[in-house]
Image (cartoon, rainbow, N blue to C red):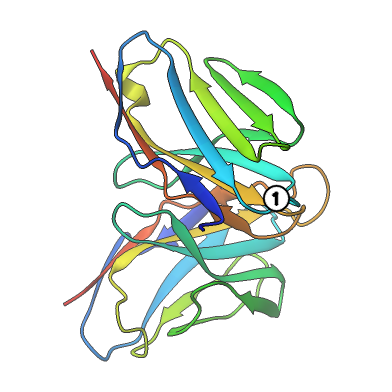
Amino acid sequence: QKEVEQNSGPLSVPEGAIASLNCTYSDRVSQSFFWYRQYSGKSPELIMSIYSNGDKEDGRFTAQLNKASQYVSLLIRDSQPSDSATYLCAVTKAAGNKLTFGGGTRVLVKP
Amino acid sequence: DGGITQSPKYLFRKEGQNVTLSCEQNLNHDAMYWYRQDPGQGLRLIYYSQIVNDFQKGDIAEGYSVSREKKESFPLTVTSAQKNPTAFYLCASSIKVGIGADTQYFGPGTRLTVL
């Protein structure tokens, strides 16, 4: 079992709709959770970090964390063609520890 | 402008040759990291350093070496012992302690191709 798992996609979403991305992790002691966006040929850029159970909203993005079920999700509201990218989920056990990345979910937003 | 720079952007290596990838940051971050990304894959940790003159192996350190002589710099050498070095190499940095200590920021990457 991989430490951090994501559906590779592609997740095809009509423009203006909500894109829902999921990530599961295997280590119960994981404490910090991150979503990065990566455009083709570019480096990852941080979208959201979340540390406690519940929802965290930032603009059109909402991260949801459920430690009991060991999953973290990302919702993209009002999806735009510019949101077409690969979204990487990353998890760390404690502050200052190394990140473990999932394989990424490719999102395609169709006009 | 604060940030992380990597050079070169593209690098071509012949079989049996060692090459060094540069990573510099002016964010005053203590910790620096090197990752490798293969097509369609996530990132895998090669080496990381949380303080000058100290570094630890990541998950795939074989065939690579690093040094951390200055806080701002963390060069990665891909040696001839690395059998499949063609990949996208990413450098990242973070603060070591305090709020946001595990939030990593990435440089633009170096794409290495073995000829």
Residue B51's spot in the image, x, y percent?
A: 74, 70
Give A2 or A101, whichever is nearer the viewer: A2
Q: Please indicate whether residue A12 sits to the left or right of residue B76 in the image.
A: left
Give B50 or A90, whichever is nearer the viewer: A90
Residue B50's spot in the image, x, y percent?
A: 71, 67
**Relative to B28, residue B44 above or below:** below
Point 31% across, 65% down: residue: B87
List the residue tagged with mark 1.
B102
Q: Residue furthest right?
A: B98
Q: Amino acid at mark 1?
A: Asp
Image mark count: 1
Q: Please indicate whether residue B73 sits to the left or right of residue A97 in the image.
A: left
Q: Residues within 10 Å of mark 1 (few under 14, many from 20)?
A: many
Where does the C terminus of chain A fall, quadrant-wise?
A: top left
Instruction: Please report, as a chain letter, where disc 1 is located.
Output: B
Q: Check disc 1 and report its element: helix, strand or loop.
A: loop
Residue B29's spot in the image, x, y percent?
A: 69, 56
Image quadrant of residue B26?
Answer: bottom right
Point 72% across, 37% down: residue: A67
Q: Is residue B1 visible?
A: no
Image quadrant of residue B57?
Answer: bottom right
**Relative to B73, residue B81 above or below:** below
